[in-house]
Image (cartoon, rainbow, N blue to C red):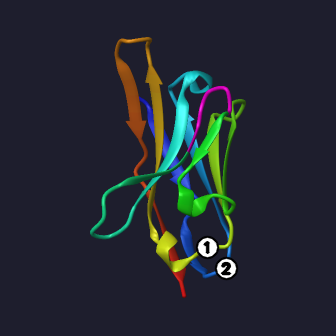
Amino acid sequence: QVQLVESGGGLVQAGGSLRLSCAASDIIFSIYNMGWYRQAPGKQRELVADITRTSITNYESSVKGRFTISRDNAKNTVYLQMNSLKAEDTAVYYCNAKYTVGLGPVYEYWGQGTQVTVSS
């Protein structure tokens, strides 16, 4: 059974840092594109950052220069280093794994989420 387990969330003051981790099991991690999404109360889930299987990265504009996504295929883990945190970064952060077979099926999995709260 595929599992994505996030950790590293918590309460931090504005300007502080957190590092989220997402450990994957029962998938061939290296072929999956990995992403971090977040959902704040009353808002839709949004992409924060993603990293392809070839380690090409992409960031939502408000986190560019503050957040860094990385992956360690040997550990089946993706990370999100979050610096200079702001109150508006407060949300539940979700890990996502996606693999598309050519023009065919999409295999997609989500973690259970980890709460990040930034106090101002």
Q: Nearer the viewer, residue 61 or 23?
A: 61
Quadrant the C terminus occupies: bottom right
Q: What residue appears at the point 37 percent right and 22 percent down from the top-left corner?
A: 106
Instruction: Assign a secondary structure to mark 1.
Output: loop
Residue under label 2: 15
Amino acid under disc 2 = Gly
Q: Is residue 106 left or right of residue 19?
A: left
Residue 28 coordinates in the image, percent (x, y):
56, 21
Give how far across and how far down residue 98 sits, in percent.
46, 30
- In primary-sequence order, the first of circles 2 and 1 is 2
Label 2–label 1 contact, CB within 8 A:
yes
The magenta region covers 50-55
Task: Say left or right for 105 vs 20.
Answer: left
Residue annotated with mark 1: 85
In the figure, 95 relative to 88: above or below? above
**3D distance between C-alphas at marks 2 and 1:** 5 Å
Residue 69 located within the stretch drawn in magenta:
no
In the displayed structure, 85 sits above or below 50; it is below
| Quarter of the N terminus within the rendering | top left
**Label 2's element?**
loop
Q: Quadrant of residue 102?
A: top left
Q: Residue at x 54, y 31 (%)?
A: 33
x then y, percent, for residue 48: 51, 53
Give the residue displayed 67% in from the left and 73% down from the top: 84
Image quadrant in which you'd find residue 29: top right
Residue pictured at 60% horizontal, 31% vertical = 52
Amino acid type shown at disc 1 = Leu
Could you tell whether 9 is left or right of 84 in the image?
A: left
Tell me which secondary structure the magenta stretch mostly adopts: loop
